[in-house]
Image (tube, rainbow, N blue to C red):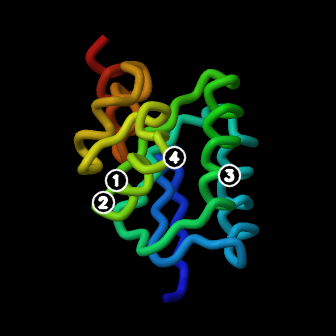
Amino acid sequence: MALTIDLTDQDNYWTLRVDGELAYDEAARFRMALDRILSSPNCSVLLDLSCVAYMDSSALGLLLSFNKKCTTQGGSVVLITGPITDRLLELTRLSAVFPQAESREAALLMLPEPVREYGRSDGIANRLAAMEAE
């Protein structure tokens, strides 16, 4: 199964959706997306792994490294998981490391308040409306 990676900047947070098999041969593409997030001023991210069919140890290592770097920079990582990623995180005991949600809406609520307040796809419109109300 081919790997699809979709990275979207949502003003105050990123959405990274991964679909397919996340294995060693695709790790470089995954790392490039993670590095792009880390190079931005805000590295809070909703990482959607709900459609991942397979994930190997190289992908888990990248996730752990990314989580450490992101939180060190003041960001946060919330995983949107599906049955396969849920089981993998339980088996590796990484479910205690990563906040997880079953939907994008639930994951968005797990981001810090400032990110949630203005971090929607209509974040610019929200800011303009707030400024006009003042």
N-terminal-most mark, 3 or 1: 3
N-terminal-most mark, 3 or 2: 3
| Residue 11 shows up from this direction | no
- Of residues 18 and 133, the one drawn nearer to the viewer in this rendering: 18
N-terminal-most mark, 3 or 4: 4
Of marks 3 and 1, the one in the foreground: 1
Whole-angstrom CA distance, mark 2 to mark 1, is 6 Å
Number of the label disc, if any, that sits on residue 82: 2
Whole-angstrom CA distance, mark 1 to mark 4, is 21 Å
The residue under label 3 is 62
SS at mark 3? Answer: helix
N-terminal-most mark, 2 or 4: 4
The picture places residue 19, in percent across and down from the top left corner, at 45, 73
SS at mark 2? Answer: loop
Residue closest to the far bottom:
1
The amino acid type found where label 3 is placed reads: Leu
The amino acid type found where label 1 is placed reads: Asp
Whole-angstrom CA distance, mark 3 to mark 1, is 17 Å
> In the shown orientation, is residue 116 left or right of residue 6?
left
The residue under label 1 is 86
At x 36% / y 69%, what residue is drawn? Answer: 51
| Residue 83 shows up from this direction | yes
Of marks 3 and 4, the one in the foreground: 3
Whole-angstrom CA distance, mark 3 to mark 4, is 17 Å
At x 43% / y 50%, what residue is drawn? Answer: 91
- Marks 3 and 4: CB-CB under 8 Å? no
- Of residues 40 and 127, the one drawn nearer to the viewer in this rendering: 40
The residue under label 4 is 14
- Marks 1 and 4: CB-CB under 8 Å? no
- Marks 3 and 2: CB-CB under 8 Å? no
> In the shown orientation, is residue 36 left or right of residue 125?
right
The picture places residue 89, in percent across and down from the top left corner, at 43, 49
